[in-house]
Amino acid sequence: MLMDDYFKEPQHSQDWIRYNQSIAPLHLPYSVLKSTLSLKFAPNITKLNRDTVVNHIKVHLSDSSILVDTGSLLHQIAQTNDAINILYIVIVVITMIIAFFIVWVSIMSNIREHLWEIGILRAEGLTKIQLAKVILIESMSIIVSSILLGIAIGAGITAITVIQMDQILERPFKLEVALLFSYLGV
């Protein structure tokens, strides 16, 4: 049976009255008025065929009826999610570039500030390699402590934000630490 066969207009005047009061035409199976109509399309349906069916259904709905095409809605959500992920990637790349230059400037300013100490250490007999090790160890201690402090503060703020969002959405808060350990290789 074709889709157009389901949506034929009634032939008799008494059928018109009942037809206009219902969502579906009278000759549908069991002729019971329905408040909800759910359709499941084949997975390989084209957008044109989906839009054709949706438009055929819209013609027969009243103005107060609501038609939701979940397939199109899920497609739009996936596109929005992809755009947000691209935005996050761009933000991370920009942040990493800025962090690199901040670390570079910090190391260079640290060397300039401690130029007098470096001169004294060189006068006492430190070689260039030993001096480079001292500067590297000092810089790495600052960098590692900053990273650990940043992770702790970031995790705390994220947890607070997620807890607030879960309370707004009335979902239970679930802390998954296994993901963190899988990234660390533990």
Image: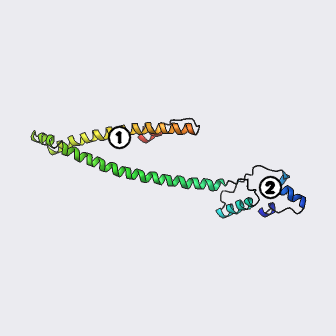
Calculate the distance from the C-alpha at mark 2 to the C-alpha at mark 1.
63 Å
Q: Which residue is drawn at 27% across and 49% down?
A: 104
Please tell me the numbered disc located at residue 66.
none
Q: In this view, does 54 lie to the left or right of 148?
A: right
Q: Is residue 59 left or right of residue 83?
A: right
Residue lying farthest to the front in this orientation: 63
**Figure quadrant of the N terminus:** bottom right
* Residue tagged 1: 147
Is residue 88 placed above or below 186 in the rendered structure?
Answer: below
Where residue 24 appears, as percent x and y from the top left, is 80, 55
User: Of the residues under marks 2 and 1, which one precedes in the sequence?
Assistant: 2
Q: Quadrant of residue 60?
A: bottom right
> What secondary structure is marked by label 2?
loop
Q: Which residue is drawn at 33% across and 39% down?
A: 146
> What secondary structure is marked by label 1?
helix
Which kind of residue does numbered mark 2 sit on?
Answer: Ala
Q: Quadrant of residue 58?
A: bottom right
Where residue 108 appears, as percent x and y from the top left, is 23, 47
Q: Can residue 126 be seen in this view?
A: no
Q: Do the CB atoms of the residues marked 2 and 1 lie less than 8 Å apart? A: no
Please tell me the numbered disc located at residue 24.
2
Q: Which residue is drawn at 47% across and 54% down?
A: 86
Q: Which residue is drawn at 26% across and 42% down?
A: 139
Which kind of residue does numbered mark 1 sit on?
Answer: Ile
Q: In this view, does 2 lie to the left or right of 125?
A: right
Q: Can residue 140 be seen in this view?
A: yes
Where residue 4 appears, as percent x and y from the top left, is 78, 64
Q: Badge 1 local density, few (<14 within 10 Å), some, or many (20+)?
A: few
